[in-house]
Image (cartoon, helix red, strand yellow):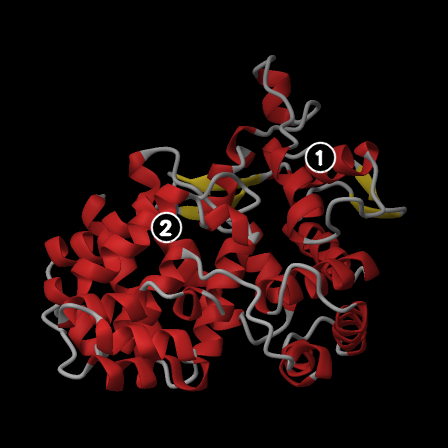
């Protein structure tokens, strides 16, 4: 299981440093976090890796499809206890009293994945959605399965619309997910979350509104939303309000040091542990183990505690030597790594460093490098 985690991290880093367009890899990281799953059992680590891979083909498609893939994946069903959810009046519950409903998946689908906190839903909607979700299972913990004998009989009403009936059908679950995907609250929630992740903690309301309108006009298609995100005047101001999360920080460092995808893939497990998995954990981000279903925090202050900054500095000092990727000319390295963001203060400090290793570390541990 440890080997699976390391291989997933190795592949993710290789894609990040190799991609000619880093934006797509950043999008994938965003959606993987949006649909966070955590392997609570060691035997589910492979499924956790597979969940992220399942999202990748759909991140530039329609959110309706992305939502279906994410929510019905066996890892999501296991993580949010859907595999223990049984309709109270289902055929299975009648034979085995004591089985009951679990609302975890329904609540997170509404609160985190679609409508957002404060969305226009009630506890009654959560329960009705949970009843509609009954029947979704992970067969032997590996494949999705729909079991009508576990489903709550009859129709359920979610946000004022009736779904389902007898017999229970997977198509009705797809229908409610599609409706949630196209809800105006979902458009606003996704637009703001994307803007916060890519632009800053308090994005311009005009940017969020334009992204939300593009989402609604395109019927949930994501490319028009990304187009607004990349071209809106409010998104083009160079503010650099975000602190790179540890994975992003390490991937950016590897790319700056000249590693490509092939070089990353050629590294042994012990190297990935030493230059990525271990340092990322010290920086506050254990690979594929977020703090909860709401994923990793976005606020800068969550990533710059004294201990986390110390870990970043240690990585900056050690990684170039561990990777045997020590730039010959630290000043040239600084110009390549930071471009126009190279500040006068850092430009003075790099040539004055006592050793070449310290000069390179000054660049990798600089404010300019840590922020995006």
Residue 312 pos. (x, y %): 31, 55
- Determine contact: label 1, label 2, CB under 8 Å: no
Is 75 in front, or is 279? 279
Quick check: 293 left or right of 45? right
In this rendering, the answer to whether 154 lies above or below 326 is: above
**Front-lying residue, 15 or 239:** 239
Q: In the displayed image of the protein, which residue is found farthest to the top? A: 97
* Residue 141 appearing in the image: yes
Select label 1 or label 2 by which is in front.
2
Position of residue 339 measured from the top left corner of the image (x, y, whole percent):
40, 85
Can residue 12 be seen? no
Residue 168 x %, y %: 69, 42
Distance CA(mark 1)–CA(mark 2): 46 Å
- Kindly identify which numbered label has been placed on residue 309: 2
Chain-order first, disc 1 or disc 2: 1
Report the residue marked by disc 1.
Answer: 131
Please indicate whether residue 347 sits to the left or right of residue 123 in the image.
Answer: left
* Horizontal side, residue 144 vs residue 199: left or right: left
How far across and how far down the image is residue 348, in percent?
Answer: 32, 78
Q: Is residue 196 above or below residue 304?
A: below
In the drawing, what numbered circle is on residue 231?
none
- Which secondary structure, mark 2? helix
């Amino acid at each position: 299981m440890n080997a699976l985690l390391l291989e997933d991290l190795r592949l993710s880093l290789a894609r990040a440093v190799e991609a000619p367009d880093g934006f797509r890899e950043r999008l994938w990281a965003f959606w993987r976090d949006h649909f966070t799953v955590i392997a609570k059992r060691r035997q589910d680590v492979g499924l956790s890796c597979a969940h992220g891979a399942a999202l990748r083909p759909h991140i530039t498609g329609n959110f309706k499809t992305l939502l279906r893939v994410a929510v019905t994946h066996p890892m999501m069903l296991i993580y949010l206890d859907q595999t223990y959810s049984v309709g109270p009046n289902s055929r299975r519950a009648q034979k085995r009293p004591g089985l009951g409903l679990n609302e975890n998946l329904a609540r997170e689908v509404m609160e985190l994945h679609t409508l957002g906190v404060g969305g226009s839903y009630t506890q009654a909607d959560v329960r009705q959605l949970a009843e509609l979700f009954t029947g979704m299972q992970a067969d032997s913990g590996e494949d999705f399965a729909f079991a009508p004998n576990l489903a709550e009989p009859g129709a359920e009403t979610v946000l004022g619309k009736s779904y389902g009936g007898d017999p229970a059908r997977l198509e009705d679950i797809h229908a409610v997910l599609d409706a949630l995907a196209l809800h105006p609250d979902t458009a606003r929630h996704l637009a703001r979350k994307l803007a916060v992740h890519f632009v800053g903690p308090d994005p311009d309301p005009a940017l969020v509104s334009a992204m939300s309108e593009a989402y609604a006009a395109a019927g949930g298609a994501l490319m028009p939303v990304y187009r607004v995100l990349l071209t809106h005047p409010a998104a083009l101001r160079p503010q650099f309000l975000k602190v790179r999360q540890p994975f992003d920080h390490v991937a950016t460092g590897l790319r700056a040091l000249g590693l490509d995808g092939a070089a990353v893939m050629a590294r042994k497990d012990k190297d990935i542990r030493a230059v990525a998995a271990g340092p990322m954990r010290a920086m506050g981000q254990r690979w594929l183990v977020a703090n909860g279903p709401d994923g990793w925090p976005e606020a800068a202050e969550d990533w710059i505690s004294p201990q986390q900054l110390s870990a970043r500095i240690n990585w900056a000092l050690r990684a170039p030597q561990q990777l045997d990727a020590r730039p010959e000319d630290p000043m040239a390295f600084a110009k390549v790594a930071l471009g126009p963001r190279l500040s006068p203060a850092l430009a003075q400090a790099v040539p004055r460093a006592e050793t070449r290793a310290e000069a390179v570390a000054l660049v990798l541990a600089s404010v300019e490098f840590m922020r995006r």
